[in-house]
Amino acid sequence: MGRESDFLRGSLHRRSFLKASAAGAAAFAASGMGFGRALAEEGWTLALSARSLSNPYHATFAKGGEDFAKSAGLPFEVLITEGNSEKGIADIRALLARTGGKLVLNVDPNDSPDARVIVEDCQKAGAYVVTQWNKPDDLHPWDHDPNYVAHMSFDGVPNGKAMGEALIASMGGSGGIVALGGILSNVPAVERKLGLDQAVAAHPGVELLDFQAADWNETKAFEIMQAWLTRFGDKIKGVWAANDGMGIGALEALRQEGLAGSVKVTGIDGIDSAIDAVRNGEFAGTVALPHRSLKSRGAGLP
């Protein structure tokens, strides 16, 4: 079976997908109420493991999980990795021990190799796990049935390309751009960068001045952008970021130099601050995914 078989991947028109997601979330919530009560009586716990709640993207995921847990009458816990794979795995192991394996876990692994360890630990404990975004290509739910329920992700190439095209259009079709990537081994980081590369290749007048990984981190993106402004100066006509958080970090550096709006930024996630930046003419675009309903669906899958 191919890699696509592992994924719930998005290629629908956004409006259609949002409608489908809302319906799916409602169905999970409705069906989960009676089943959830039975699980609650048996002492099961729902949990989310993610990088940081300071990122509005992950905060929205947590809210979706909380909403589903409340509808199902189950306790809900949030584990924060702080970008540290060892901490993420250790916290999950501790929760598995504390719950005696009666755990339904939705996890966004900090790095792709982490997923294998987490899945194997959950299977040994008798817990159920859904992974999101990151996993090795040879790790499949059917090899760990029934404990590894699903892997959820989206093809990042179209979004990366679309934001590259939007940025290039805002520059008039030519000029130098700089690009901020996520953790280099993360699947969405790889796919979104591939999309950017396709957009740049289609426009001979555009030069990618530099690409650096800011690891999905706003502060790191701010610091990289400051260094780029010193290094490249007015050669920079646009900034592409693999997520909105890094885009906002770059925008803050541009604001300090009085360049916000004249040097456009793009991101991915559709967080409120990025949407505001689009309205203010500082961002050339962002892409929104239905994170809250995805988390609710992920929590309900087992």
Image: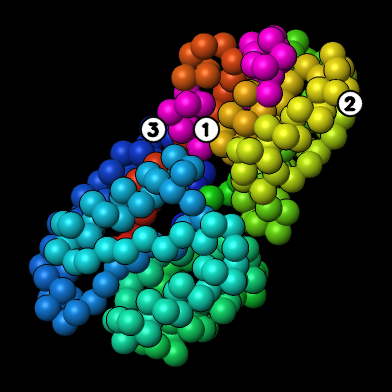
Q: In terms of sequence position, does the residue under pointer 1 or pointer 2 come before the other?
A: 2
- Which dot marks residue 233? none
Left or right: where does residue 168 sit relative to residue 272?
right
Position of residue 263 measured from the top left corner of the image (x, y, whole percent) = 71, 15
At label 1, the amino acid type is Val
- Which dot marks residue 15? 3
Comparing 297 with 177, the one in front is 177
Classify 10 Å Cα crowding around label 1: few (below 14), some (14-19), many (20 and above). Answer: some
Position of residue 13 measured from the top left corner of the image (x, y, whole percent) = 46, 35
Q: In terms of sequence position, does the residue under pointer 3 or pointer 1 come before the other?
A: 3
| Figure disc tally | 3
Write the start and end of the magenta stretch as one range: 253-275
Left or right: where does residue 291 sit relative to residue 67?
right
Classify 10 Å Cα crowding around label 3: few (below 14), some (14-19), many (20 and above). Answer: few
Quadrant where the C terminus is found in the figure: bottom left
Residue wearing tag 1: 287
Q: In terms of sequence position, does the residue under pointer 3 or pointer 2 come before the other?
A: 3
Q: Residue at x 28, y 43 (%)?
A: 22
Q: Give how far apart the Cα atoms at labels 3 and 1 are.
A: 12 Å
Contact? badges 3 and 1 (CB < 8 Å): no
At label 2, the amino acid type is Arg
Classify 10 Å Cα crowding around label 2: few (below 14), some (14-19), many (20 and above). Answer: few
Helix, strand or loop status at disc 2: helix
Q: Give how far apart the Cα atoms at labels 3 and 2 are.
A: 41 Å
Residue 172 visible at all: yes
Comparing 54 with 137, the one in front is 54
- Which dot marks residue 231? 2
Residue 269 in magenta stretch? yes
Position of residue 112 measured from the top left corner of the image (x, y, whole percent) = 63, 66
Image quarter for residue 259?
A: top right
